[in-house]
């Protein structure tokens, strides 16, 4: 079936209900969505808890997690209407959710060639007058709850923030080996581990030809993190999203399509406003690495060798706990670290010199802007990739090794098109600081100090 046939067959997605219970120090919640006429989805989540709770205190969070969950099930058929039945939401909340569905699913629309601009493309209505109180849980909030995924970014955040004296905890959703180990290596206590289960019917529908594609996963983490922080008494929910995440991949129907939309500053800003008004004012969500570019974070990560053998960033081989050595994520992580680590250490981490592997060449060209559009992956800006590739030529020269073709191609292009020299552009990138962030003063101070120290060392190594 094509899009119009799917929309005719499934005119509405109804958020019918949510249920939750506390059993042996675990909160178990599930939601019920109906893709009319007769497809029922029931995703689930399990959250560890430490004390007895008045269940009414957490009900607003359970309801809101359902609002974000429904996006994954709506996209299977893109029904013209979404109906909210468990509780009342305001017109402002409806507008916020609609905005997230449009911007957060931009890549999905692009890859499925869906025109989302018609006024009747999506209508969100509410059929309930039942209000849920938004009061925060009754406890003192202090310290940081750090979201951990097992890549280089959250490892940098863990290492730098452990120097602050305030209480700290970590949160992992559906833990991987690399995420658990990054927390152990950084010296933190055992993480809070949440288990989320997608309804298998959704996968069956995708296999049967229903629509599939990228969803704004980090939006879910923002809501979940705020809930867990409030539940455990943390003041800050800290992500590790960077300034580079703001760069678009392409333009489609006059919308900037950004694979990393829910990691962008725009989303962070809008979520903070929403959370303060409709969730709790006791918890603050922000990204610790927001002022920095991805290349700067790679330089910081190079300073923590204890994580180099353990971290993983490849989404393709996530379940295999390895690098696929083909995808854009592998390509970017490799080129971003190449100029900051000894050559042998790069080989120890990745097993090969990825610049020399034929199967990754298209991904290297993609992240460097030599393709139709920037790859739909969590990678740095095109400028960062191009400069890192161009700088790699000098490293091969110092090793008296032949410069790989992709490195030479980009180095020549950058040298011919930039008025500044490659080293001057690198210095600009490695020392830049974006003022668009929500870091508290103590967090900003320690990140600035670390960046100043490391960038000076990095620039000496590059020259």
Image: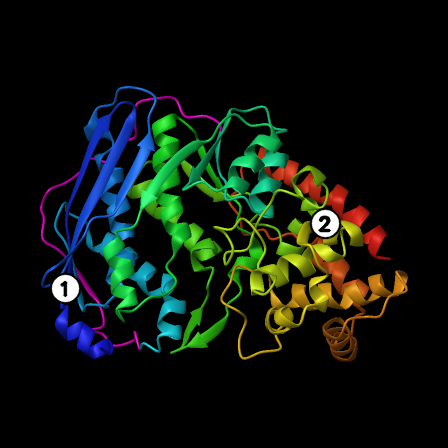
154 on left or right of 416: left
Q: Indicate the position of residue 3 as horizontal and vertical percent values.
A: 24, 76
328 on left or right of 334: left
Q: Residue at x 66, y 63 (%)?
A: 384
21 on left or right of 234: left
Query: Visible in this render: residue 364?
Result: no
Q: Secondary structure at mark 2?
A: helix
Q: Secondary structure at mark 1?
A: strand
- Residue beneath disc 2: 348
Q: Indicate the position of residue 400 as horizontal and vertical percent values.
A: 90, 64
Q: Indicate the position of residue 408 as horizontal and vertical percent values.
A: 78, 74
Is residue 435 shown above or below 143? below
Nearest to viewer (mark 1 / mark 2): 2
Q: Residue at x 29, y 66 (%)?
A: 207
Is residue 425 shown above or below 372? above
Judged by its main secondary structure, the magenta piece is: loop
Q: Count neighbours of disc 2 (C-alpha within 10 A) and say few if under 14, some if 14 to 19, many if 20 or more.
A: few
Residue 134 is covered by the magenta coloring: yes
Is residue 65 shown above or below 352? above
Q: Residue at x 76, y 56 (%)?
A: 339
- Residue beneath disc 1: 12
Q: Nearer the viewer, residue 407 or 90?
A: 407
Q: How is the image coloured?
A: rainbow
Q: Quadrant of residue 325?
A: bottom right
Q: Which quarter of the figure is the N terminus placed in?
A: bottom left
Q: Nearer the viewer, residue 310 or 103?
A: 310
The magenta region covers 115-143
């Amino acid at each position: 079936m094509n899009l119009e046939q799917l929309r005719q067959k499934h005119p509405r997605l109804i958020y019918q209900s949510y249920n939750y219970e506390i059993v042996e120090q675990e909160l178990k919640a599930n939601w019920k969505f109906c893709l009319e006429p007769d497809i029922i989805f029931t995703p689930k989540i399990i959250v560890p808890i430490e004390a007895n709770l008045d269940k009414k205190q957490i009900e607003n969070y359970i309801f809101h997690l359902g609002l974000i969950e429904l996006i994954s099930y709506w996209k299977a058929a893109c029904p013209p209407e979404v109906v909210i039945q468990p509780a009342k939401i305001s017109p402002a909340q409806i507008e916020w959710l609609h905005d997230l569905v449009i911007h957060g699913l931009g890549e999905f629309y692009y890859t499925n060639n869906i025109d989302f601009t018609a006024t009747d493309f999506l209508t969100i209505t509410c059929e309930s007058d039942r209000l849920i109180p938004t009061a925060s849980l009754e406890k003192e909030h202090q310290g940081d709850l750090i979201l951990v995924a097992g890549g280089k970014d959250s490892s940098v955040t863990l290492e730098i923030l452990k120097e602050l004296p305030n209480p700290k905890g970590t949160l992992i959703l559906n833990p991987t080996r690399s995420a658990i180990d990054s927390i152990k290596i950084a010296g933190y206590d055992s993480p809070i581990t949440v288990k989320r289960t997608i309804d298998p019917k959704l996968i069956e529908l995708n296999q049967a030809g229903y629509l599939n594609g990228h969803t704004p996963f980090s939006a879910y983490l923002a809501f979940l993190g705020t809930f867990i922080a409030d539940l455990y008494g943390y003041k800050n929910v800290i992500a590790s999203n960077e300034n580079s995440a703001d760069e678009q991949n392409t333009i489609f129907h006059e919308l900037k399509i950004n694979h990393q939309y829910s990691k962008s500053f725009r989303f962070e800003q809008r979520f903070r406003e929403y959370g303060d008004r409709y969730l709790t004012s006791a918890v603050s969500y922000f990204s610790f690495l927001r002022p920095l570019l991805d290349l700067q974070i790679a330089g910081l990560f190079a300073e923590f060798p204890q994580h180099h053998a353990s971290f993983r960033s490849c989404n393709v081989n996530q379940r295999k706990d390895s690098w696929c050595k083909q995808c854009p994520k592998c390509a970017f992580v490799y080129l971003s670290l190449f100029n900051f680590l000894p050559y042998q250490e790069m080989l120890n981490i990745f097993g090969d010199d990825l610049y020399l592997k034929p199967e990754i060449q298209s991904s290297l060209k993609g992240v460097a802007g030599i393709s139709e559009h920037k790859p739909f992956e969590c990678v740095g800006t095109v400028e960062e990739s191009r400069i890192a590739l161009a700088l790699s030529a000098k490293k091969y020269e110092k090793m008296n090794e032949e410069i790989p073709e992709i490195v030479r191609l980009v180095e020549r292009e950058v040298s011919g098109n930039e008025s500044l020299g490659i080293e001057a552009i690198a210095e600009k990138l490695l020392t830049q600081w974006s003022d668009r962030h929500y870091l508290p003063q103590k967090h900003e101070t320690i990140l600035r100090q670390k960046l100043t120290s490391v960038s000076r060392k990095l620039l000496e190594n590059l020259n």
